[in-house]
Structures are given as C-alpha cells and as structure tokens.
Amino acid sequence: MSGEPDGPEDRLRRFATIWSRAVYPVTSTSSTRPEFEACLLPLARRLSEALRARSFDADAGKAVGAALVEAHCTDPEALSRTLDCVDAYLVLYCGEDGDREDLRARSARLQHAMAAGFAQALRERTLAEQEAIAQAALEAQGVVAQALHDTEARFRAVFEGAAIGIGIADLEGNILQVNNALRRMFGLSEPGLRSRNVRDWVHPDDAPQTWRLYDELVSGEREHYHLEKAFYRQDGTVLWTNLTVSLLRDADGEPQYQLALMEDTTERRLLNLRLRYEATHDALTGLPNRTFFFERLEKALSAGKDRRFGLCYLDLDGFKTVNDSLGHAAGDRLLVEVADRLQACATAPGEMVARLGGDEFVALTTGPDTQRTVDELAARIMNALLAPISVDGRELTVRGSIGIVEGPAGERSAAEVLRSADITMYRAKSAGGNRFELADPEADARAITRHGLTTALPTALDRGEFFIEYQPLVHLGDGSVRGAEALVRWLHPQHGVLSPDRFIPLAEHTGLIVPLGRWVLEQSVRQAREWRDRHGGEALGPLRINVNLSPCQLTHPGLVQDTVEILERTGVAPDSLCLEVTESALIGADDDLLKPLRRLAEMGIDIALDDFGTGYSNLANLRRLPVSVLKLDRSFTQSMQRFPADPVDLKIVEGIVSLAHSLDLAVTVEGVETGAQAEQLRILGCDTAQGWYYARPGPPDRLHELALVDATG
C-alpha cells in the first residue's frame, strides 16, 4: 500500500505540512505550528489552482507572497525556504497528471511572482514603518528636548527603551550618548562608541549629498535630514541604516546637539539585492538577462560622443534539433555550457555577455576602439564553440551565426541597435551559418522594408490594393491574339506599384499566397468571361486566360474544388483556362502532388510547364506530367538578340519544339522583344509567344483593343 496521499486534498494538506515545517522555525509568530499550517493551507490551495489554471495568473503568486508578509514571515530566510519548498514539492503534490515540463515552467513563474509580491508587501510595510519612525523621530526630538530642559529621568526612559538606535553628539561630532539598540547594531560597548567622532564614519558608498547635509545641519542651516547610510562595524562587516539626524537647540534657540535615529536595514537590503539579482539574471545560465542587458546597452549608448560600442548577436545553428532529438533537459545543459564558454570570452573591462532567451546570446564591448575589439570578440566566440560539448554521453558540435553592430554612442537607440544586430545575424544564418556578418544599413533597410510588406500583406487583400495586368499571348503563325497571362500587381500606399517578385515570395512564406492566388484566379476568369461577352463570342474566337500557380497552391487541398467553383460561378468553359506551373515545382514530383493537376487536366483545363529549360529536369519525365503547354524560359529568346543567332541555341530550341510537338504539347515562348526574334521562333515551329514586342502587361481593355485590331485586319 503506497505511503503517498490518496486524493488531491490529501496531497494539498501534505504540501502545506511540508511548507509549514520548513518556514515555521524562521517565522516571528505567536501561533503554534499546527495553527501556522492551517494559515498556509489556503495559500497552498491558491498556488495549486494557479498551477493548474487554463491561463497563467501571476497575481495569484504575488498575492501568496504578500500573504506571507502578513503572516509575519518577513525574515529573508522564510522567503528562501518557501521558494525552495514550492520548487521541490508544488508540482509533485499538486501537479496531478499534467504536462510536467509545462508545470515546472509554470511553477518557476509562480516563484518569481511570489518573490515579487513578497518584495512589494515588504516594501509597503517598510514604508509604513519608516513613516512611524519619522513620526517617532519628531516625537523623540521633542521628548529629548523637554527631558534635557525638565527631567533627566523622563529622557532616560525614552532613550534607553527605544527599539531604534539613538545617539547624541555635540556640534563638533563627538558622540556623547548612545542607547542599547545602537550599541547592539555596532557591536560595541558605550565607551567604545563614545570615543568616536561622527566624521570617522565615512563610507565609500555614502551618497554625494551626505556630508553636505551634515555640514548644513551642524551650522544651523537645516533642522534635520534623512537618508540611507552605510557604516563599518568593528568586525569589518557593513551595517546599512535608515538615518535621520535632527538638530537640538537650547532654550534660546541656539544649536547645541545633534540627535541621530538609526534603523538597521541590512537584512532588508540583502533581500532586495537578491531579488534584484533574480530579476536581472537568467535563471538557467546565471548570465545577465534581457532587462540587465538593455540597461547596460542604454548606458553605453549614452556615454558620450567620443565613446563607441560593439555588439555581437549570437544565435546557435540547429539548436532546435538538439531539443527535438535529445529533449529540453539536454538542450538546457548545452546552453549552460555555451554560456560558460561565452562568459570566458568577455572578461576585458567594458565587456559583458547576456542571454536574451532561448538560444540567443549577446556580447557587448565598449571603449574608444570597438571597431577592432568587437571583431576580436566575435572571433573568440566562434573559436569557443569549436570544441564539441558532451551531453548525456554524446559529443555535440555547436555552431553559431553572429550579427555585429559597431558604431559611435548617441546615434541610435538600444532597440534600433538590437534590431540591426538581429537582422544581420539572420543574414549570416541565411548565408549558411557558422559565420559572422557586419551590419549593413542598406541590408537593414531592405529587411525592414520586407518586414513592413510582410505585415501589410494580410490586410492589403481586404483593402483592395491588388490589381491584375494582362500580357497578350500571340499566335506566331497568323499574329492573332489567342489570350493573355494574368500578372498580379500590388498598389502599395507608400511604395507605389510593386511587381510580383517583390511580394510573391513573402506571400508564399506567410501562407497568404493561397487566398491571394484564389483571388487572382477568380478575377482573371471573370475577366475572361467579360472578354467573351464583349467580343460576341464568335468573331474573335475564345480568349484563353493563363494564371500562375505557386508551389504552395499546388499542395493546398482546396485547389481543385476552388477552381471548379470559380468556373461554374462565372460560366467559363474549362478550356478557356490555362494554369501555369514552374518546372522547378514539379521536379521529382510524386503522384500525390500530380493528382490535383491530373484532375484539372481531365476537366479540360490546360496545364503549362512554365520557365521550361531552367530546372534541369529529365525530358523523358514530360510523359508523366499532365501538361499540354511548354513555356520556354526567356533565356532562350535573349540568346537570339545577337545576329546571327548562336546555332547551338537554335538547335536546342528546335529540338525542344520537335520533342514537345511529338508529345502533342504546344510551345509558348516568353520575352520576345524584336520582330527578328518572333520570325526566328516562328521558323523554329513555336506556337505562341508573349513579350514587349507585342505589348507590355496592361489593363484588360488594352487586350480587347489588340484583339479587335487582329479581327478587323
């Protein structure tokens, strides 16, 4: 029979018991331990609910941290033991059957929230205590003055019974009297303190105004001042205090003594330093985190015009593969080792390394000659990653891509510098990785423009910013217009008309190419219907519309259904439509990829193999492709611009045309710019052509006019 609790409530009570046993010894409470455990039970329940909630709520953790302060758990050790207990047992007893990795991550976030709530509540309590101390100081000043004037007995009762440290000195700084609380703070006897002078307690961490305020007080220019001050104890340790110093005057109003009231804030300061460290350092690697790094970077950028900075932005190559194959625990150990190596690379003054998150690190160097030092720093980082890292008995090779930004301080903000470094790092990664690149303003501008276009794409279609131009397809035998290719354009509000090569790759990357391609197909087919209606159908013959399909559209499951619905809705016959697919998209295509094209071809839709001659495909492979048209790449026509044309190129085109016709494929040629090219292609047996010789892409009415001219002679 298992010794573990049976139900969730039993597990929750067990967690509360463990928690209370850990924290109770360092808690200032009059409650018994069972009573203290009962107090922690609702807090444990709230942590359990927050751990298993659908969405993470940091307020729950903050509320628990604040409740600890309310329960008199104000000792820093109480918070430390609480966080250790939550880290070790919360997921174990309250996680039930959830995803352990997710629960551990959420537990860590709850711990951070608890620490933040604890610190906030402790701060509010401290402020209240300081207010009370300030009030007590004013009251003590009056009481001491009255006691000096009236009765030594009353003064002594207040002086010795005060919980805060009190000392009296003359205007020369000689200490005259101290109470027991002050003696305990300094660890000295009264004779040891009375032999000291106030000015002996200068400390390197004194605020700049500390001794100016003191001089003003003893000279009678001010009545009191309050600040935080550090003192050295007899054993060399540092005592931090909230210090209030007031001027005592005699009955005639003349300055006579100075009264110091001290509150020991050493433990509170140490807690704040610990919380600050946790807030500014990465929990996994111990390196400074994004918050700390931005503070240092902003400081470096505001250092002055004669100062410079250098930044290396590192992203590990292939780190996702490590996580996917070996697990996140192995990935974490890898990151820790990388962090240690990077830390060893940045040891010179003005250098630091930080982890921004995931597998992204930054190294910063400052000084007058960062143009040289940042390159050396990047080289040290690359060399540090050369040696394999052993993780779970496996030797892992780690490589990284680095983007370097260097320049004078004061010209760019921290966000701009980091964005440039990020862009440059991805440029290094796109170039193959395991290298570093220097920031280039022009490359940054292009990347920012691409990003702007990418973010604008989703709404551009809804706003009607796309339009279509049509380039006629001309029969080489009789010069008649047989149809047109639909070419989409983007009328961007800032950049004007953009050609497809500016935005189609972005649309394919984001997946927007599917709805955009569907829109182009529908608009083009509607235009074909309009041409048919305007021409009267018979006089000019059917005008076929050619529409390009991207590789993403080929794999989209709705391609066939969308095409059929558009044709049926517009009343256009399938043989009036030709879908163009690039040769490179079909290289090595399997039957699953070819299946939708075969279905479309069986319906009567022509399939054209676009840019033929650039993909190095096997010509014999044409037999298995459901294509009816070959579109020769414009590189073939460019070779014919020279006179006489290269006979080898002519033989190649002649061979392709002969092969295509033997397979019952029509041949279309792109990029025809001269009459000589058109005549040569006609002689070689090509069927149709398009290019600037006939017309540039333009509005649909222009094609109508060209077709009417052909029809009327």
Image (cartoon, rainbow, N blue to C red):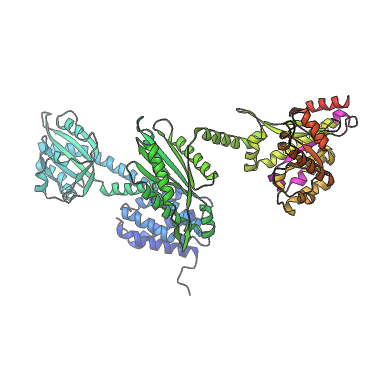
Q: From this viewpoint, is residue 350 visible?
A: yes
Task: Give the quarter of the image for residue 148.
Answer: top left
Relative to 597, is 459 on the left or the right?
A: left
Task: Please state which of residues 273 and 309 is positioned toward the viewer in this rendering.
Answer: 309
- Residue 585 is situated, as x and y percent measured from the top left of the image, at 70, 46
- Residue 689 is situated, as x and y percent measured from the top left of the image, at 79, 34
Relative to 235, is 316 on the left or the right?
A: right
- Residue 470 is situated, as x and y percent measured from the top left of the image, at 75, 31
Asked whether residue 548 is drawn in magenta, I would say: yes
Residue 268 vertical placement versus 700 (above, below)? below
Relative to 182, is 622 on the left or the right?
A: right
Q: Residue at x 39, y 53 (%)?
A: 340
Task: Give the quarter of the image for residue 477.
Answer: top right
Residue 321 vertical placement versus 522 (above, below)? below
In the rendered image, the quadrant that contains the C terminus is: top right
Q: Residue at x 51, y 62 (%)?
A: 96
- Residue 362 is situated, as x and y percent measured from the top left of the image, at 43, 44
Residue 412 vertical placement versus 564 (above, below)? above
Q: From this viewpoint, is residue 63 visible?
A: no
Q: Residue at x 27, y 41 (%)?
A: 130
Relative to 166, is 304 on the left or the right?
A: right
User: How many numbered marks are there?
Assistant: 0
Q: Residue furthest right?
A: 538
Q: Residue at x 86, y 27 (%)?
A: 710
Asked whether residue 501 is drawn in magenta, I would say: no
Bounds of the magenta span? 533-562
Task: Please state which of residues 426 and 173 is positioned toward the viewer in this rendering.
Answer: 426
Q: Residue furthest bottom?
A: 1
